Amino acid sequence: MLRGDPNFRRLSPAEQQRVIQQLHEVNKLSEEQRQRRLARAEMIEHMPPQELMRINNSARRWLTLPVDRQALMKNAFRDLRAVPLDQRPTVLNSARYKDVFTPEERGILSDLLRVEPYLPVR
């Protein structure tokens, strides 16, 4: 089915292989993970280019941080996913996060959380 798509056929063989690999990876996800990934893709699709660029820059900045800081931020990111979208800025700027993260790190978290759907705790 995919191989019959004209847009897919226009991709280079390397790009075609990358798309096929991504689809295989998505098929391995749980239904909840797939839905979250779709929700994130939907958010990204409707973002203005400058906003998307900002998020990409924040992702690159995250990778330049020391590993121990990345681990702390990963835990915070996981926790903040459970906070409703409209409450995330308030929580992120609370004393709890200001005492642990620099303004740059909180900015990175804020940017990356813009494309992270609300994931309530079970």
Image (cartoon, rainbow, N blue to C red):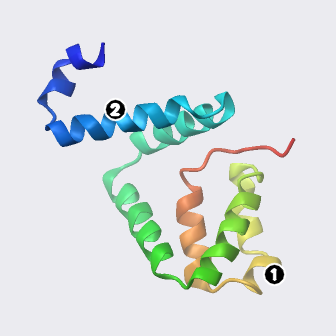
Which percent across, then down, holds residue 103?
Answer: 60, 84
Marks 2 and 1: in contact by CB < 8 Å? Answer: no
Above or below, 76 against 104 in this view is: above
Residue 27 image point, x, y percent: 52, 28
Q: Can see residue 23?
A: yes
- Of the numbered discs 1 and 2, the one sitting upstream in the chain is 2
- Residue at 69 percent across and 45 percent down: it is 118
Q: Secondary structure at mark 2?
A: helix
Give above or below for 56 relative to 107. Answer: above
**What is the x, y in percent for residue 79?**
76, 60
> Counting other residues with Cα less than 10 Å from the Cα at mark 1, is it few (<14), some (14-19), or many (20 or more)?
few
Q: Is residue 60 left or right of residue 30?
A: left
Left or right, 64 with respect to 7, comes to right
Quarter of the image that includes the C terminus:
top right
Q: Which residue is mark 2?
A: 20
Could you tell me which residue is drawn at 77 percent across and 87 percent down?
A: 99
Residue 17 to residue 73: above or below: above
Residue at 61 percent of width and 31 percent of height: 35
Percent position of residue 8, x then y? 21, 26
Quarter of the rendering containing residue 39: top right
Q: Which mark is residue 95?
A: 1
Which residue lies most toward the right here? 122
Q: Nearer the viewer, residue 95 or 33?
A: 33
In depth, the one of 25 and 112 nearer the eye is 25
